[in-house]
Image (cartoon, rainbow, N blue to C red):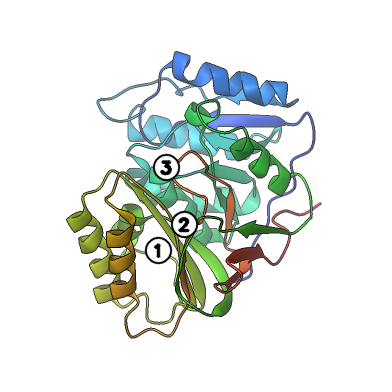
Amino acid sequence: MNPVKPRQLKQGEKIGVIAPAGPVLETELQAGIELLEEFGHKVKLAPHLYDKQDYLAGDDEARLEDFHAMFTDNRVRAIFCARGGYGTLRILDKIDYKILRENPKILVGYSDITALLLAIYKKTGLVTFHGPVIKELTKRTIGNLESFLNQVSSNGLFELELAGGRCLRPGRATGVLLGGNLSLICHLIGSPFMPSLKGALLFIEEKGEDLYRIDRMLTHLRLSGVLEELEGLVAGSFQDCGDRASIDRLLLDTVSGLNIPLVTGLPVGHGLINVSLPIGLQAAIDADKMTLQILEPCVTS
Protein backbone atom coordinates (compact mmCIF):
# COMPACT_ATOMS: atom_id res chain seq x y z
CA MET A 1 0.00 0.00 0.00
CA ASN A 2 1.30 3.43 -0.91
CA PRO A 3 1.18 5.55 2.25
CA VAL A 4 -0.86 8.73 2.38
CA LYS A 5 1.12 11.31 4.33
CA PRO A 6 -0.59 14.16 6.20
CA ARG A 7 0.57 17.73 5.67
CA GLN A 8 3.19 18.92 8.11
CA LEU A 9 2.16 20.88 11.18
CA LYS A 10 3.33 24.47 11.12
CA GLN A 11 3.95 26.85 14.00
CA GLY A 12 0.75 28.32 15.38
CA GLU A 13 -1.61 25.92 13.61
CA LYS A 14 -4.55 24.44 15.46
CA ILE A 15 -4.49 21.08 17.22
CA GLY A 16 -7.71 19.24 18.05
CA VAL A 17 -8.27 17.09 21.13
CA ILE A 18 -10.68 14.14 21.16
CA ALA A 19 -11.50 11.30 23.56
CA PRO A 20 -12.29 8.23 21.43
CA ALA A 21 -11.69 5.76 24.25
CA GLY A 22 -11.84 6.16 28.05
CA PRO A 23 -13.27 9.15 29.97
CA VAL A 24 -11.18 12.06 31.23
CA LEU A 25 -11.65 14.95 33.61
CA GLU A 26 -10.94 18.54 32.64
CA THR A 27 -8.34 18.74 35.40
CA GLU A 28 -6.47 15.78 33.89
CA LEU A 29 -6.03 17.51 30.53
CA GLN A 30 -5.49 21.13 31.48
CA ALA A 31 -1.72 20.91 31.93
CA GLY A 32 -1.24 19.12 28.62
CA ILE A 33 -3.41 21.61 26.76
CA GLU A 34 -1.46 24.49 28.26
CA LEU A 35 1.80 22.85 27.19
CA LEU A 36 0.64 22.68 23.58
CA GLU A 37 -0.24 26.35 23.80
CA GLU A 38 3.21 27.12 25.22
CA PHE A 39 4.66 25.48 22.11
CA GLY A 40 2.72 28.03 20.08
CA HIS A 41 -0.31 26.04 18.99
CA LYS A 42 -3.98 26.84 19.26
CA VAL A 43 -6.12 24.07 20.72
CA LYS A 44 -9.67 23.05 19.85
CA LEU A 45 -11.54 20.81 22.28
CA ALA A 46 -14.13 18.38 20.95
CA PRO A 47 -17.70 19.10 22.15
CA HIS A 48 -18.01 15.69 23.85
CA LEU A 49 -14.46 15.61 25.22
CA TYR A 50 -15.55 15.35 28.85
CA ASP A 51 -18.58 13.09 28.37
CA LYS A 52 -18.70 9.92 30.45
CA GLN A 53 -20.66 6.72 30.06
CA ASP A 54 -19.33 4.14 32.49
CA TYR A 55 -15.83 3.25 31.19
CA LEU A 56 -16.25 5.23 27.95
CA ALA A 57 -15.87 8.91 27.09
CA GLY A 58 -19.54 9.13 26.17
CA ASP A 59 -21.57 6.86 23.92
CA ASP A 60 -20.28 5.59 20.60
CA GLU A 61 -22.25 8.12 18.57
CA ALA A 62 -20.84 11.10 20.49
CA ARG A 63 -17.25 9.92 20.24
CA LEU A 64 -17.70 9.17 16.54
CA GLU A 65 -19.23 12.59 15.94
CA ASP A 66 -16.24 14.31 17.53
CA PHE A 67 -13.85 12.16 15.54
CA HIS A 68 -15.43 12.95 12.19
CA ALA A 69 -15.80 16.64 13.03
CA MET A 70 -12.09 17.06 13.75
CA PHE A 71 -11.18 15.59 10.38
CA THR A 72 -13.62 17.80 8.48
CA ASP A 73 -12.61 21.03 10.27
CA ASN A 74 -10.15 22.70 7.88
CA ARG A 75 -8.71 24.80 10.70
CA VAL A 76 -7.49 21.71 12.58
CA ARG A 77 -4.17 20.34 11.31
CA ALA A 78 -3.37 17.69 13.92
CA ILE A 79 -5.45 15.63 16.33
CA PHE A 80 -4.36 14.43 19.77
CA CYS A 81 -6.21 11.74 21.69
CA ALA A 82 -6.90 12.58 25.32
CA ARG A 83 -6.02 9.14 26.71
CA GLY A 84 -6.25 5.42 26.03
CA GLY A 85 -8.32 3.13 28.21
CA TYR A 86 -10.94 1.30 26.18
CA GLY A 87 -13.38 2.20 23.44
CA THR A 88 -11.78 2.59 20.03
CA LEU A 89 -12.59 -0.97 18.99
CA ARG A 90 -16.27 -0.15 19.35
CA ILE A 91 -16.25 2.54 16.65
CA LEU A 92 -13.97 1.03 13.99
CA ASP A 93 -16.85 -0.32 11.91
CA LYS A 94 -18.78 2.95 12.22
CA ILE A 95 -16.07 5.31 10.96
CA ASP A 96 -16.61 6.93 7.55
CA TYR A 97 -13.14 6.25 6.15
CA LYS A 98 -13.95 8.30 3.03
CA ILE A 99 -13.87 11.39 5.25
CA LEU A 100 -10.35 10.49 6.37
CA ARG A 101 -9.14 9.82 2.83
CA GLU A 102 -10.45 13.20 1.71
CA ASN A 103 -9.07 15.03 4.76
CA PRO A 104 -5.73 13.40 5.67
CA LYS A 105 -4.50 14.77 8.99
CA ILE A 106 -2.00 14.00 11.70
CA LEU A 107 -3.46 11.71 14.38
CA VAL A 108 -1.50 10.67 17.47
CA GLY A 109 -2.07 8.41 20.46
CA TYR A 110 -1.15 4.98 21.86
CA SER A 111 -2.35 2.13 24.06
CA ASP A 112 -6.05 1.60 23.20
CA ILE A 113 -5.60 4.11 20.36
CA THR A 114 -3.51 1.40 18.64
CA ALA A 115 -6.72 -0.04 17.19
CA LEU A 116 -7.61 3.31 15.66
CA LEU A 117 -4.14 3.92 14.23
CA LEU A 118 -3.89 0.52 12.57
CA ALA A 119 -7.47 0.51 11.28
CA ILE A 120 -7.04 3.92 9.66
CA TYR A 121 -3.85 2.82 7.95
CA LYS A 122 -5.50 -0.40 6.75
CA LYS A 123 -8.58 1.33 5.37
CA THR A 124 -7.05 4.51 3.96
CA GLY A 125 -3.27 4.22 3.80
CA LEU A 126 -3.02 7.33 6.00
CA VAL A 127 0.15 7.46 8.08
CA THR A 128 -0.78 7.77 11.76
CA PHE A 129 1.45 8.32 14.78
CA HIS A 130 2.00 6.09 17.78
CA GLY A 131 2.90 8.65 20.42
CA PRO A 132 1.85 10.62 23.49
CA VAL A 133 -1.65 11.46 24.68
CA ILE A 134 -2.74 14.74 26.25
CA LYS A 135 -3.31 13.31 29.73
CA GLU A 136 0.36 12.31 30.06
CA LEU A 137 2.15 15.19 28.31
CA THR A 138 3.33 16.78 31.55
CA LYS A 139 3.62 13.59 33.60
CA ARG A 140 6.53 12.21 31.58
CA THR A 141 9.59 13.63 29.89
CA ILE A 142 9.04 16.71 27.70
CA GLY A 143 10.99 14.84 25.03
CA ASN A 144 7.87 12.82 24.20
CA LEU A 145 6.10 15.91 22.89
CA GLU A 146 9.24 17.30 21.31
CA SER A 147 9.88 14.09 19.36
CA PHE A 148 6.35 14.16 18.01
CA LEU A 149 6.47 17.82 17.00
CA ASN A 150 9.87 17.33 15.36
CA GLN A 151 8.53 14.49 13.25
CA VAL A 152 5.37 16.20 12.07
CA SER A 153 6.77 19.69 11.50
CA SER A 154 9.69 18.85 9.19
CA ASN A 155 10.58 16.69 6.22
CA GLY A 156 13.66 15.27 7.88
CA LEU A 157 14.49 11.63 8.54
CA PHE A 158 15.29 10.28 12.00
CA GLU A 159 16.99 7.42 13.77
CA LEU A 160 16.37 5.95 17.21
CA GLU A 161 19.11 4.38 19.29
CA LEU A 162 17.85 1.45 21.34
CA ALA A 163 19.92 2.39 24.37
CA GLY A 164 19.61 -0.13 27.16
CA GLY A 165 18.00 -2.66 24.85
CA ARG A 166 19.11 -6.17 24.01
CA CYS A 167 19.84 -7.89 20.71
CA LEU A 168 18.05 -11.21 21.06
CA ARG A 169 18.37 -12.21 17.41
CA PRO A 170 20.97 -10.52 15.17
CA GLY A 171 20.38 -9.21 11.69
CA ARG A 172 19.19 -6.28 9.62
CA ALA A 173 15.85 -5.78 7.95
CA THR A 174 13.69 -3.17 6.25
CA GLY A 175 9.93 -3.04 5.99
CA VAL A 176 6.77 -1.10 6.70
CA LEU A 177 6.64 -0.06 10.36
CA LEU A 178 3.50 -1.28 12.11
CA GLY A 179 2.66 -1.93 15.73
CA GLY A 180 1.50 -0.66 19.07
CA ASN A 181 -0.11 -2.22 22.10
CA LEU A 182 0.16 -6.01 22.06
CA SER A 183 -3.33 -6.77 23.37
CA LEU A 184 -4.97 -4.44 20.82
CA ILE A 185 -3.01 -6.01 17.98
CA CYS A 186 -4.25 -9.41 19.12
CA HIS A 187 -7.84 -8.16 19.24
CA LEU A 188 -7.60 -6.87 15.65
CA ILE A 189 -6.36 -10.17 14.21
CA GLY A 190 -9.13 -11.79 12.19
CA SER A 191 -10.95 -8.49 11.70
CA PRO A 192 -11.00 -6.36 8.53
CA PHE A 193 -9.13 -3.62 10.40
CA MET A 194 -5.80 -5.38 10.86
CA PRO A 195 -3.14 -4.47 8.26
CA SER A 196 -1.17 -7.27 6.66
CA LEU A 197 2.16 -7.90 8.36
CA LYS A 198 3.72 -9.19 5.14
CA GLY A 199 7.08 -7.46 4.79
CA ALA A 200 6.56 -5.46 7.98
CA LEU A 201 8.66 -4.48 10.96
CA LEU A 202 6.41 -5.01 13.97
CA PHE A 203 6.87 -3.20 17.27
CA ILE A 204 4.95 -4.15 20.40
CA GLU A 205 4.53 -2.80 23.92
CA GLU A 206 2.35 -3.60 26.93
CA LYS A 207 1.59 -2.63 30.51
CA GLY A 208 0.41 -4.35 33.66
CA GLU A 209 -0.16 -7.84 32.24
CA ASP A 210 0.89 -10.98 34.11
CA LEU A 211 3.56 -13.02 32.41
CA TYR A 212 1.16 -15.80 31.47
CA ARG A 213 -1.05 -13.25 29.71
CA ILE A 214 1.92 -11.95 27.74
CA ASP A 215 2.65 -15.59 26.86
CA ARG A 216 -0.97 -16.07 25.73
CA MET A 217 -0.93 -12.98 23.50
CA LEU A 218 2.42 -13.77 21.89
CA THR A 219 1.30 -17.37 21.35
CA HIS A 220 -1.87 -16.05 19.73
CA LEU A 221 0.23 -14.02 17.30
CA ARG A 222 2.30 -17.09 16.45
CA LEU A 223 -0.65 -19.44 16.05
CA SER A 224 -2.57 -16.95 13.90
CA GLY A 225 0.18 -17.14 11.30
CA VAL A 226 0.50 -13.37 10.91
CA LEU A 227 4.19 -13.42 11.92
CA GLU A 228 5.36 -15.80 9.22
CA GLU A 229 6.10 -13.07 6.64
CA LEU A 230 7.40 -10.54 9.16
CA GLU A 231 10.77 -8.90 8.46
CA GLY A 232 11.62 -8.03 12.07
CA LEU A 233 10.26 -7.71 15.60
CA VAL A 234 11.07 -4.87 18.00
CA ALA A 235 9.96 -4.73 21.64
CA GLY A 236 9.19 -1.51 23.46
CA SER A 237 8.49 -1.21 27.16
CA PHE A 238 6.65 -4.01 28.97
CA GLN A 239 5.83 -1.93 32.02
CA ASP A 240 4.94 -3.99 35.11
CA CYS A 241 4.75 -7.22 33.12
CA GLY A 242 7.40 -9.26 34.89
CA ASP A 243 11.18 -9.49 34.78
CA ARG A 244 13.06 -8.72 31.59
CA ALA A 245 14.63 -12.15 31.27
CA SER A 246 11.23 -13.83 31.25
CA ILE A 247 9.87 -11.39 28.66
CA ASP A 248 12.95 -12.01 26.52
CA ARG A 249 12.41 -15.75 26.70
CA LEU A 250 8.80 -15.39 25.54
CA LEU A 251 9.86 -13.12 22.67
CA LEU A 252 12.46 -15.65 21.56
CA ASP A 253 9.88 -18.44 21.71
CA THR A 254 7.59 -16.35 19.53
CA VAL A 255 10.10 -15.96 16.68
CA SER A 256 11.42 -19.51 16.92
CA GLY A 257 11.66 -20.82 13.37
CA LEU A 258 11.55 -17.32 11.85
CA ASN A 259 14.73 -15.94 10.32
CA ILE A 260 14.25 -12.35 11.51
CA PRO A 261 16.07 -9.94 13.82
CA LEU A 262 14.65 -9.42 17.30
CA VAL A 263 15.63 -6.54 19.54
CA THR A 264 14.30 -4.85 22.65
CA GLY A 265 14.75 -1.36 24.05
CA LEU A 266 12.51 0.63 21.72
CA PRO A 267 11.63 3.78 23.74
CA VAL A 268 7.88 3.57 23.22
CA GLY A 269 4.94 2.55 25.35
CA HIS A 270 3.79 3.00 28.92
CA GLY A 271 7.18 3.81 30.39
CA LEU A 272 8.60 7.25 31.06
CA ILE A 273 9.76 7.65 27.46
CA ASN A 274 7.25 7.32 24.63
CA VAL A 275 8.90 8.54 21.44
CA SER A 276 6.58 8.93 18.46
CA LEU A 277 6.68 6.46 15.57
CA PRO A 278 4.91 6.74 12.20
CA ILE A 279 2.61 3.85 11.36
CA GLY A 280 2.88 2.80 7.71
CA LEU A 281 6.29 4.10 6.61
CA GLN A 282 9.42 2.27 5.50
CA ALA A 283 11.88 1.67 8.33
CA ALA A 284 15.07 -0.30 8.95
CA ILE A 285 16.19 -2.20 12.02
CA ASP A 286 19.86 -2.97 12.63
CA ALA A 287 20.22 -5.42 15.51
CA ASP A 288 24.01 -5.12 15.42
CA LYS A 289 24.05 -1.34 15.79
CA MET A 290 20.83 -1.37 17.84
CA THR A 291 19.14 1.32 15.78
CA LEU A 292 15.77 1.89 14.17
CA GLN A 293 15.71 4.26 11.18
CA ILE A 294 12.69 5.82 9.54
CA LEU A 295 13.63 5.88 5.86
CA GLU A 296 11.29 8.58 4.56
CA PRO A 297 9.71 11.82 5.75
CA CYS A 298 6.61 11.41 7.89
CA VAL A 299 4.69 14.35 6.39
CA THR A 300 4.41 16.36 3.20
CA SER A 301 5.18 20.06 2.85
Q: Residues within 10 Å of mark 1 (few under 14, many from 20)?
A: some
Q: CA distance from mark 3 to mark 2?
A: 18 Å
Q: Secondary structure at mark 1?
A: loop
Q: Are marks 3 and 2 in contact (CB under 8 Å)?
A: no
Q: Percent x, y for residue 293?
A: 65, 64
Residue ID for mark 2? 118
Using the rendered view, name the quadrant where residue 189 is placed. Answer: bottom left
> Which element carries disc 3, helix, strand or loop?
loop
- Marks 1 and 3 in Cβ contact (< 8 Å): no
Q: Position of residue 205 (x, y in %)?
A: 40, 53
Q: Residue at x 32, y 39 (%)?
A: 86
2 or 1: tag closer to the N-terminus: 2
User: What residue appears at the point 45 percent right and 19 percent down from the top-left corner?
Assistant: 28
Q: Residues within 10 Å of mark 2 (few under 14, many from 20)?
A: many
Q: Amino acid at mark 3?
A: His
Q: Label 3: which residue?
A: 270
| Foreground disc of the pair 1, 3 | 3
Point 24% across, 75% down: residue: 223
Q: Is residue 112 left or right of 246 when viewed as pictured?
A: right
The residue at which mark 1 appears reads as: 194
Q: Are marks 2 and 1 in contact (CB under 8 Å)?
A: yes
Residue 232 coordinates in the image, percent (x, y): 48, 74
Residues 163 and 234: in front is 163
